[in-house]
Amino acid sequence: MGFSPEARGFYRNELEGIRQAGLFKEERYLHSSQDAVIEVEFPEGAAPRRVINLCANNYLGMSSHPDVIAAAQEGLRTRGYGLSSVRFICGTQDLHRQLEAKLTSFLGTEDTLLFPSCLDANAGVFEALLSDQDVMIADRLVHASIVDGMRLCKAAQDTFKHSDMEHLQEKLIEHQDKRFRMIITDGVFSMDGDLARLDVMANLAEKHNAMLFVDDSHATGYIGKTGRGTHEHAGVMGRVDIITTTLGKALGGASGGCVSGRRELVAMCRQRARPYLFSNTVAPVIVAGALRVLELIGSSTERRDKLEDNSRVWRKMLTDAGFDVKPGDSAIVPVMLYNAKLAQDMARDLFAEGIYVIGFFFPVVAKGQARIRTQLSAAHDRSHLEQAIEAFVKVGKKYDILGKGKKEIIAAYGA
Ligand SMILES: *Cc1c(COP(=O)(O)O)cnc(C)c1O
């Protein structure tokens, strides 16, 4: 027998173990498009409910923007549904090259290469550029897909403590014997919403002769005065050697990613990056939609300004109500609860109150760092935030955590 009873038993046990540990991931079914308010079926079989969405990466509200949908439809009509090919065989349309040029100009880099996703960009970029004579020095909180990409690369690996620039400097000095050094960081860190210190990093990179790599997936489109990303915010545009980012968040939320940066590095990825060489091209419908998104956000900062305003207002509402909120400048606003069960219980109660949020806990964040991560969107209006804070206060009172800090919450609930 191929799939033996023993094998089936083994996997059933594993799944049960995940459930017992409280780590089982449940899907919730949306019956609507992605927006500020969505219709969600949860638990499975329940009648869909309209809830305010505070957990999407739909930062600029582009996921169901009528102009983006119209452009995508036009792309579908004129360029077809799929290309049935990888890029270098017969999967590159003029649209793909136009999108790469638009991304290059938006990000302020020299060239750009599209990938099926940013996960794929990260999976391919390190192996394409570095060898066993080199070293990758990464922040300890980088995204899982960077960790995976580094594993596929033969260069030596090292890490520095999260955002600790002295530690990074020590590592750069320690690795001066290597041919190339690459500093690797996220632009906005997804769980805390804090920004990488790119001004310091760019200086360190130049002083210690290293390349600087930034994954700006949670920033592209809205961080910085014109939304170009953390490099704009930090005043180091043109000094980041490689940016990877996604089309799956602020830039429309469909799918797709890219490597953007120094011309020669991007050209090497075109020759060597395996997810580019061996996975299908991004569909024309997505490329056409993303082109429209870049036109919209390139011609006006209205949406990123509204998002900045929403984030500031929401942060203040939570803080004034007595929640323990992580400080930061992004549209990611984590409400700290420390205890995993508390985070899950509160998220469930908030859903009952019409607010869709998710509790995060180990292993997604460190042990004792459980939280509800809220995310703002330019699609939210003040009335959404007012409804949401009312529900948060009601639930916060129920669990008696308002006005309490880390020590008191842990004393009451454990970590
Ligand atoms: C979301 C995210 C990714 C993955 O992007 P996809 O295009 O969905 O694969 C990669 N890196 C970071 C930092 C992210 O936040």
Image (cartoon, rainbow, N blue to C red):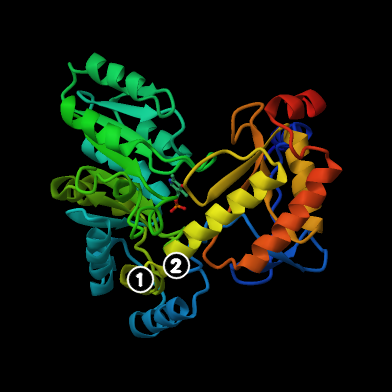
Mark 2 falls on what kind of element? helix
Q: Percent from the top left, x then y, of residue 132?
A: 23, 24
Q: Residue at x 33, y 42 (%)?
A: 214
Quadrant hosting residue 311: bottom right
Q: Percent from the top left, x then y, of residue 63?
A: 51, 68
| Relative side of 87 to 405, left or right | left
Q: Which mark is residue 303?
A: 2
Residue farthest toward the front in the current orientation of the protein: 320
Q: Is residue 361 visible in this depiction of the protein?
A: no
The answer as to whether callout 1 falls within 8 Å of ligand 1 is: no
Q: Is residue 222 above or below residue 130?
A: below
Density class for disc 2 (Cα within 10 Å; few <14, some 14-19, many ≥20) is many
Residue type at mark 2: give it: Arg
Q: Residue at x 44, y 67 (%)?
A: 303
Of 173 and 175, nearer the camera is 173
Q: Residue at x 77, y 68 (%)?
A: 48
Task: Work out how far the residue at label 2 is from the one at label 1, CA to CA, in angstroms.
Answer: 8 Å
Q: Quadrant of the C terminus?
A: top right
Residue type at mark 1: give it: Ser
| Relative side of 316 to 11, left or right | left
Q: Residue at x 81, y 57 (%)?
A: 352
Count of numbered marks? 2
Q: Percent from the top left, x then y, of residue 231?
A: 30, 47
Q: Quadrant of the N terminus?
A: top right
Q: Which residue is mark 1?
A: 300
| Relative side of 299 to 409, left or right | left
**Disc 2 to disc 1: CB gap under 8 Å:** yes
Q: Percent from the top left, x then y, of residue 397?
A: 83, 44
Of 347 and 224, nearer the camera is 224
